[in-house]
Amino acid sequence: MVELLHRVRVFVYQLNDGAPDYLLLRSAQGIEGFWTPIHGPIGFGEQLESAIRREVMDDIGLGRPHKLLDLQMTSRWLVGDEEVIEWNYGFQTMPNADSLKLDAERWADFRWSGFAAAYPSLELENDRAAIIRLHAMLHDAA
């Protein structure tokens, strides 16, 4: 029997003069830490938007998004007897969100980066695909 695990991946961004800056976080896992968006589990019976807001609040201390974008791309893979399904979202915050309250147990560092620096910093191919989608959606909306 396969157990389903649902997770969210949240790409926090802010617009400065119409250009997006993306928030990247480095895991507190020491040498294996790499740059990533916010991510975490969706609780049993929890709505997607509630999970997104909870993860963002717990990890960096930001409340409601200025805008929440469904990237309309899910990732699925099998790990042993678990099937992981990840839902990708964009979370717009207001400019100058530099006073983040980082969860120090989970994250060692953060930085705001434009697309040209953010894209190659992401280790996982699914994250790269998601940030391309988000960047294209933001460009089309401008």
Image (cartoon, helix red, strand yellow):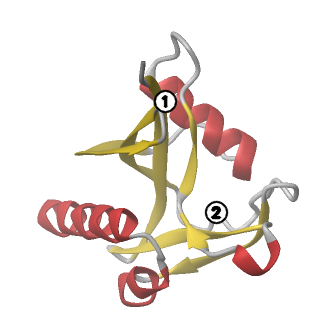
**To which quarter of the image does residue 124 belong?**
bottom left
Position of 79 relative to 112 (above/below): above
Cα distance between the residues tagged 2 and 1: 31 Å
Q: Earlier in the sequence, mark 2 or mark 1?
A: 1
Q: Which residue is label 2 attached to?
A: 97
Query: What residue lies at 53% left-to-right and 57% top-to-bottom?
Result: 94
Residue 114: image x %, image y %? 43, 83
- Residue 83's disc is none
Q: Nearer the viewer, residue 5 or 136?
A: 5
- Residue 5's disc is 1
Query: What residue lies at 71% left-to-right and 52% top-to-bottom?
Result: 60
Query: What residue lies at 64% left-to-right and 32% top-to-bottom?
Result: 54
Secondary structure of the residue carrying numbered label 2: loop
Indicate left or right for 85 with 40 as reference.
left
- Location of the N terminus (image quadrant): top left
Residue 8: image x %, image y %? 47, 40
Give the farthest residue toward the top: 45
Residue 38: image x %, image y %? 57, 54
**To which quarter of the image does residue 78 belong?**
top left
Query: What residue lies at 74% left-to-right and 60% top-to-bottom?
Result: 100
Secondary structure of the residue carrying numbered label 1: strand
Q: Amino acid at mark 2?
A: Ala
Q: Amino acid at mark 1?
A: Leu
Q: Mark 1: few, some, or many residues within 10 Å (few <14, many ≥20)? A: some
Position of 68 relative to 23 (above/below): above
Circle 2/circle 1 CB separation < 8 Å: no
